Image: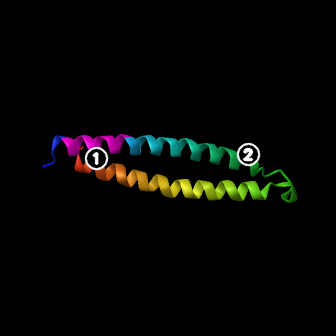
Amino acid sequence: MMGDGERLKRMGRLEENKLQAREAEIKMQGLVESLREHLDPFEKLDELNTELIASQALELARLKIDYTGLLDSIRAIEKALGR
């Protein structure tokens, strides 16, 4: 059984993780939209901004890894809180 202080600490951490996950979702959605725009199938290959595309794809991959970790943490805290 956890004490009130520990419970409050976990609840605070849970809300912090949820906020970080939401921020990551917003950033990832923006990157997906940007990638779709820059990966125009009608654009000539030599006119694609491949450096920008690669940079955004790497950032999306990094955010996804962080996001998955946050979701795992959220589930673990919720389980510990009996939710």
Q: Is residue 12 magenta?
A: yes
Q: Work out whether mark 2 precedes mark 1 in sequence or the reverse, and give the earlier one.
A: 2
Q: Amino acid at mark 2?
A: Glu
Quarter of the image for residue 13 reads top left
- Residue 74 vs residue 4: left or right? right
Q: How many marks do you count on the picture?
A: 2
Q: Could you say where residue 35 lies in the image, as x and y percent from the top left?
A: 69, 50
Q: Can you see residue 24?
A: yes
Quadrant placement of the C terminus: top left
46 in relation to 27, above or below:
below
| CA separation in Å, label 2 and label 1 | 38 Å
**Label 1 crowd (10 A; few <14 / some 14-19 / many >=20):** some
Q: Which residue is mark 1?
A: 78
Q: Amino acid at mark 1?
A: Glu
Q: Could you say where residue 45 lies in the image, as x and y percent from the top left?
A: 84, 59
Q: Which residue is mark 2?
A: 37
- Residue 63 vs residue 38: left or right? left
